[in-house]
Image (cartoon, grey):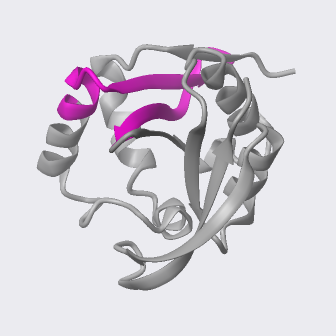
Amino acid sequence: MTEIGLREVRDEDLDAIYDQMRDPEAVRMAAFTAEDPDDRVAFDAHLVRLRTAPDIHLQAITADGELAGTIASFAVGTDTEITYWLGREFWGRGIATAAVRKFLATVPVRPITARAASDNPGSLGVLRKAGFRPVGKEVAYATARGQEIEETVLRLDGP
């Protein structure tokens, strides 16, 4: 059984996170990504903001001590949302579901919202297993795909 952990993002994690967030298949599945995933300067500036903003709670996800991805909560108006990213080599092993559950235990705000491309069954499954329920659909521009796509909005109301 893989041991899943959460910890602060470290400077030495940045190269691996950058590689994970520009993997072409992961970018396509996530759909709502950076305008240019290969722009390291923009990535570094984005991570500085994520790591220092008082209303963003960013954590590294580890699997048996190895960096597997990131997870964060952030304010959008009066709502709180959760997002996560897992390196492709960690997909399909229950790591994301365990990390989301563990992270949610540290975020007391409810309700909490999550979003995923409606054609991303893996991410939708992770969120459902963590207790999120679909509450709507929206059409939004997905930078990674260069077009508008349907996005499922999910919410977790309870603890």
Q: Residue at x 77, y 37 (%)?
A: 130
- The residue nearer to you, when weighing 69 against 141, is 141
Asked if residue 101 lies left or right of residue 145, the reply is right
Asked if residue 86 lies left or right of residue 39, the reply is right
The image position of residue 119, as x and y in percent, is: 66, 74
Q: Residue at x 45, y 47 (%)?
A: 20
Q: How many marks?
A: 0
In the rendered image, the residue lying farthest to the bottom is: 147
Picture layout, residue 144 above or below residue 111:
below
Q: Residue at x 71, y 46 (%)?
A: 127
- The residue nearer to you, when weighing 102 against 45, is 102
- Asked if residue 52 is among those painted magenta in the image, a careful observer would answer yes
The image position of residue 143, as x and y in percent, is: 34, 73
The image position of residue 149, as x and y in percent, is: 50, 81
- Asked if residue 121 is among those painted magenta in the image, a careful observer would answer no
Residue range in magenta is: 48-76
